[in-house]
Structures are given as C-alpha cells and as structure tokens.
Amino acid sequence: LTHAPYGGNLEGIRAASLAWFGKEPKALSLAEAGLLVALPQSPESRRPDRNPQRARTARNTIIQRLVETGVIEKAEARQASSQAIPATPKRSRATRTSAGSILETCTKRNATTNETMSETMRQRRRRRCA
C-alpha cells in the first residue's frame, strides 16, 4: 500500500489518507479505511470526488467482505456503510506544507544551479578572450 495508486497524484496510503481525510492512516474510521482499501483496484473510476456512487459501492463491498470473513460484526458494517463519501479532498496542512517545501527547495536549488552555471560560463568567456 505504500506505493499503490490512489488517483490523481496520490501514491501510497499515507498520502491518500492525509489528502482525503486529513489524518494519519492509523486514525481512520472503518468506513474511511474501507474506501482507501477499495481505491487502488481502480483509482480513477472510484475517485470519491468524481464518482461518489462507485466509491461508495466499492467501499461497501470491502466492508461486506469483512463481515463475511468474521473480522467485523454486521452492526459495525451497517454503521460504516451509512457514512458519507467525501465530496472533495481535505488536504491537510502537513500535505500542503510538504508540497510547498519541496517546491521551494527545488526552486532554490534551480536558482543556485543557474547562478553557478552562469558564473562558470562567464569565467570561460573571460579565459577565451584573454
């Protein structure tokens, strides 16, 4: 699940958990975890923001399988299946910050590289002309 696709640019269960629910995977409810388990099989067609009915059906199928295998009780399954599917991602502050930090780091690195390259080119021109 670390590298599983979750639709859009999301890869890995932690990224999907933070993006869709704004919390770490270990803090997910049964319904939220069921949705994230269902997404990798068909991430784009089951994206909750684009196909909420498909996402709900896939999540409920996972929850039903948990009942059939005896992992959870029917009452838990009914409660989890009745929970709403998120209509939009809830990008957490941590997700935005890390993306911003990565972008900022890349921008700084490119600026430094470009300055270094420009300086090197100037030095070469000076040597040729001298």
Image (tube, rainbow, N blue to C red):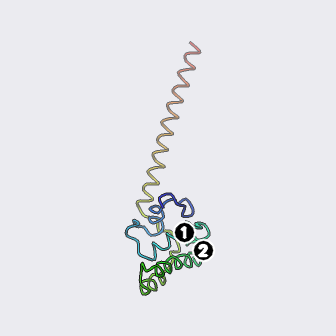
Toward the top, the furthest residue is 130
Q: Position of residue 47 (x, y in %)?
A: 57, 70
Badge count: 2
At label 1, counting other C-alpha atoms closer than 10 Å, the crowd grade (few under 14, some 14-19, many 20 or more) is many
Work out whether residue 77 or residue 112 is closer to the camera in this orientation and state it.
77
In the rendered view, would you say 49 is above or below 113? below
Q: Residue furthest front?
A: 69
The reply to whether the C-beta atoms of the residues labelled 2 and 1 are less than 8 Å apart is: no
Residue found 58% across the figure and 66% down from its top: 43
Q: Nearer the viewer, residue 48 or 88?
A: 48
Q: CA distance from mark 2 to mark 1?
A: 11 Å
- Callout 2: helix, strand or loop? loop
Residue ID for mark 2: 51
Please state the horizontal and vertical placement of residue 64, each as a whole percent of the image.
50, 81
- Which dot marks residue 15? none
Give the labeled residue for mark 1. 39
Furthest toward the right, the residue is 45
Q: Amino acid at mark 2?
A: Asn
| Dot in front, 2 or 1 | 1
Residue 9 percent across, percent down from the top left: 55, 59
Q: Position of residue 42 (x, y in %)?
A: 60, 67
As shown in the figure, which amino acid type bears the numbered disc 1?
Answer: Leu
29 above or below 98? below
Residue at 57% from the left image edge and 67% from the top image edge: 41
The secondary structure type at the circle numbered 1 is helix
* Mark with earlier residue (2, 1): 1
The residue positioned 50% from the left and 78% from the top of the image is 65
